[in-house]
Image (spheres, coloured by chain):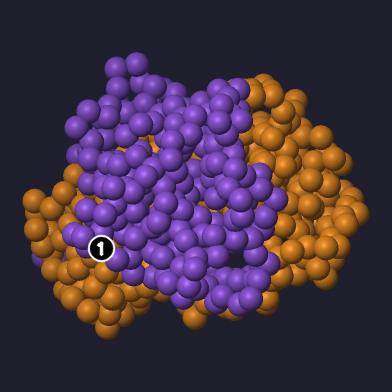
Amino acid sequence: MNIYVCIKQVPDTETKIKINADKSGIDTAGIKWILSPYDEFAVEESLRLRDKNPGSSVTVISAGPARVVDTVRTALAMGADHGVHVEIPETADSHLAAKALAGALKKEPQVDIVFAGKEAIDDGAAQVGQLVAALMGIPAATVVMGIEYAAGSVKCRREVEGGAIENLTLPLPAMITAHKGLNEPRYASLPNIMKAKKKEVKSLSMADVGVSEGDRKLKLKNFELPPPKQAGRLIPGEPAQQAAELVRALHTEAKVV
Amino acid sequence: MAKVLVFVEQREGKLKKASFELLGAASAAGHEVHALLAGSGVSGLAEGLGAYGAATVHVADDPALKNYTSESHTRVMLAAMKAASPQFVFATHSPMGRDLMPHLAAALDAGLASDCTMVKFSGDQIALRRPVYAGKATAEVEFTGSGPRLVSVRANALGAPKVDPARKASASKLAVDLAGLKTQAGDLQKGSSERPDVTEASVVISGGRAMKNAENFKIIESCADTLGAAVGASRAAVDAGYRPHRDQVGQTGKVVSPTLYIACGISGAIQHLAGMRTSKTIVAVNTDPQAPIFQVADYGVVCDLFTFVPLLTEEFKKLKDH
């Protein structure tokens, strides 16, 4: 099987976000960049699928600025076979990114299945997986927590509100976006980290994959930090008094119960 | 006045109240509001959507639409787009809406502003703001291309709509070709919990690592049940196996903005704060007065949660009995 994984590089979850001077984005100085956490589940799933199907290979594809190559190597160190980097601007929206990824996938001789994270934890748009699927004309299952593989099809479990489960059967090729719970991602071993350094990461330009700046649909601007919260009120007294006073305040001041 | 199409969400004939928010906001702004209702045996629900502001409801009622799939519902949405020619298309950023809308965006080659928490109409213009970095910041969204503007909105972000039961919507039947769908959906497996989902509830009560085990969450559940609230958890509590991942609030879990959020035994890691800081009123219960959660709390209670939560439950019960 020719297995593909779309991944994104994002700031570490512990990052304290600062806005840049013209408010067009965040200040990226000093940020530690990581593989987006949901993409880890996608990479892990692709490796497990490959190992169950001898002769298969896993290719990771990422679209972004030059620094993204480091994150492609992170996935190679987990065990992926090949890497592709499409260079697009830092400020690309979901459409431009999806068209770049789909363009790179269309250059591949055969695509049997594509994985991605259910969303990236930077812009949290939760769009790219579905957009790539639609651009390639293949079905998609998103926020997937369990997969049963059959010949030529997959059965996906996706959790929706209230813990209810949707069961979807899709013919391959298909796009599957991964959610926490799908598997337990592995850590890269030292030998694999060394090997990953030597693996080739194919580099593609926007022109190579047939996209341009005009493919953007959205612009994010005027970034702001959330307004600082006014200092709250500590409720004094014995526990029983605290409980009574809290409920009174929620009822008569905040009017939320 | 613009034309607005709202994707009205239903599962098994039960309409989602977050859809009413969308109808109400578009109607309050003076727009011509179209709704799309898709499912099997749902026609009877159409007229009632008028109460929330829908003027016309496009109905796709077909056994093939019994269980949602992005593929079938994209076709239905495209048919509704043709019938209504809207400038704006709205859906809730729910498990269904967030799955569906990018497919529609691709089919229309249109931009989609997803998970917006601020929507302001002025005339035929729209101003949108959405959280980024899981709420550690927000950004304005500008559409740069032409064509319809697609928007998905976080539940509870727009507030309850004005309801006028006397208003009736006119229903219009949509003909949609549903042959040759690739994706097959089985029947929905119901969740074990009768409690609302953390992303839908107007009150969320969460527990952290200090809960010590899964069993202890019963005191949170009892408290939640007095208010019809959802039960949430911090990442630490989920990673320790006290709660399923679907209850996790935070950057790698769910981002919620209920009217009331009560954090019990949660220290307030940056990860967690990102997921709940837009809640209208926040209460923190913690033994450590230095815990960062108190910096975002409107009301703080320094107390052991095992002492405090049962007392709080009793007070909520008293309030409800009045």
Q: Which chain is orange?
A: B
Nearest to the observer: residue B55 or residue B315: B55
**Would residue B226 be seen by someone viewing this image from the given angle?**
no
Kindly identify the residue that appears in the image at 59 percent across and 43 percent down: A107
Q: Is residue A6 left or right of residue B41?
A: left
Whether residue B35 is situated above or below residue B31 in the rendered picture: below
The residue under label 1 is which amino acid type?
A: Tyr
Q: Position of residue B2 (x, y in %)?
A: 74, 28
Location of the N terminus of chain A (image quadrant): bottom right
Nearest to the observer: residue A98 or residue B14: A98
Q: Is residue A172 left or right of residue A8?
A: right
Q: Position of residue B117 (x, y in %)?
A: 48, 40
The part of the image, by quadrant, that contains residue B208 is bottom left
Q: Chain of mark 1?
A: A
Nearest to the observer: residue B300 or residue B22: B22
Q: Which chain is purple?
A: A
The part of the image, by quadrant, that contains residue B24 is top right
Whether residue A103 is situated above or below residue A116 in the rendered picture: above
Location of the C terminus of chain A (image quadrant): bottom left
Mark 1: secondary structure: loop
Q: Position of residue B296 (x, y in %)?
A: 24, 45
Kindly identify the residue that appears in the image at 35 percent across and 38 percent down: A68
Kindly identify the residue that appears in the image at 79 percent across and 45 percent down: B78
Whether residue B140 is situated above or below residue A255 in the rendered picture: above
| Badge 1: residue crowd in 10 Å (few <14, some 14–19, many ≥20) | few
Nearest to the observer: residue A148 or residue B230: A148
Residue occupied by mark 1: A187
Q: How many marks?
A: 1
**Would residue B220 be seen by someone viewing this image from the given angle?**
yes
Q: Is residue A80 left or right of residue A174?
A: left
Kindly identify the residue that appears in the image at 62 percent across and 44 percent down: A106
